[in-house]
Image (cartoon, rainbow, N blue to C red):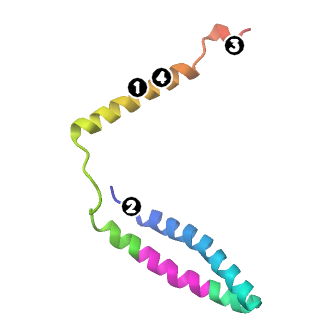
């Protein structure tokens, strides 16, 4: 299964926003300067976003670390999921007479 470029970008942006807030906060605590902390935060975001995105795309070029599911196992998992869905549908449906009371 391969990841789309859009998913890689969204993952990179959300991760970098969280990490940049941490970097900005630390820079502000250590320098006491909003201007310096902002500059560090922006530079941090741009550089590390690019590195993270390129790393994600590079890993997407290889299948290393993935295991193949045997056809028999995949069928068994699919059958189990179908069975669970059927049970959930039965559990959530109520007879019409039950809603009249």
Which mark sits nearer the N-terminus, 3 or 1? 1
Mark closest to the chain's N terminus, 1 or 2? 2
Point out the tag, 4 or 2, that comes first from the N-terminus. Answer: 2
The residue labelled by disc 4 is 87
Image-based side of 97 in relation to 77, left or right: right
Q: Are marks 1 and 2 in contact (CB under 8 Å)?
A: no
Which label sits in the foreground, 3 or 1?
1
* Residue on which the image places disc 3: 99
Sequence-earlier tag: 3 or 2: 2
Q: Is residue 6 above or below residue 42?
A: above
Graded by Cα atoms within 10 Å as few (under 14), some (14 to 19) or many (20 or more), the crowding at tag 4 reads: few
The residue under the point 47% across, 80% down is 50
Q: Which residue is mark 1?
A: 83
Residue under circle 2? Answer: 3
Could you tell me which residue is drawn at 63 percent across and 80 percent down? 23
Residue 101, numbered circle: none
Q: Position of residue 37 (x, y in %)?
A: 69, 87
| Foreground: disc 4 or disc 2 | 4
Above or below 17: residue 67 = above
Residue at mark 1 to residue at mark 4: CA–CA distance: 6 Å
Looking at the rendering, the stretch of residues picked out in magenta corresponds to 42-54
Q: Residues within 10 Å of mark 2 (few under 14, many from 20)?
A: few
* Residue that appears at 60% across and 15% down: 94
| Secondary structure character of the magenta stretch overall | helix
Residue extending farthest front: 30
Q: Nearer the viewer, mark 4 or mark 3?
A: 4
Q: Are marks 4 and 3 in contact (CB under 8 Å)?
A: no
Task: Check if mark 1's residue and mark 4's residue have beta carbons within 8 Å.
Answer: yes
- Residue 16 % position (x, y): 56, 73
Describe residue 11's horizontal placement relative to residue 76 as left or right.
right
Tag in front: 1 or 2 = 1
């Amino acid at each position: 299964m391969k990841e789309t470029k859009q998913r890689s970008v969204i993952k990179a942006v959300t991760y970098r926003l969280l990490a940049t807030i941490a970097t900005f906060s630390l820079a502000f605590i250590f320098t006491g300067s909003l201007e310096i902390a902002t500059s560090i935060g922006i530079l941090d975001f741009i550089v590390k976003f690019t590195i993270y995105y390129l790393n994600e795309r590079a890993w997407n070029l290889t299948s290393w670390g993935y295991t193949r599911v045997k056809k028999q196992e995949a069928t068994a998992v699919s059958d189990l999921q179908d069975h669970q869905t059927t049970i959930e549908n039965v559990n959530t449906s109520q007879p019409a007479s039950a809603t009249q009371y």
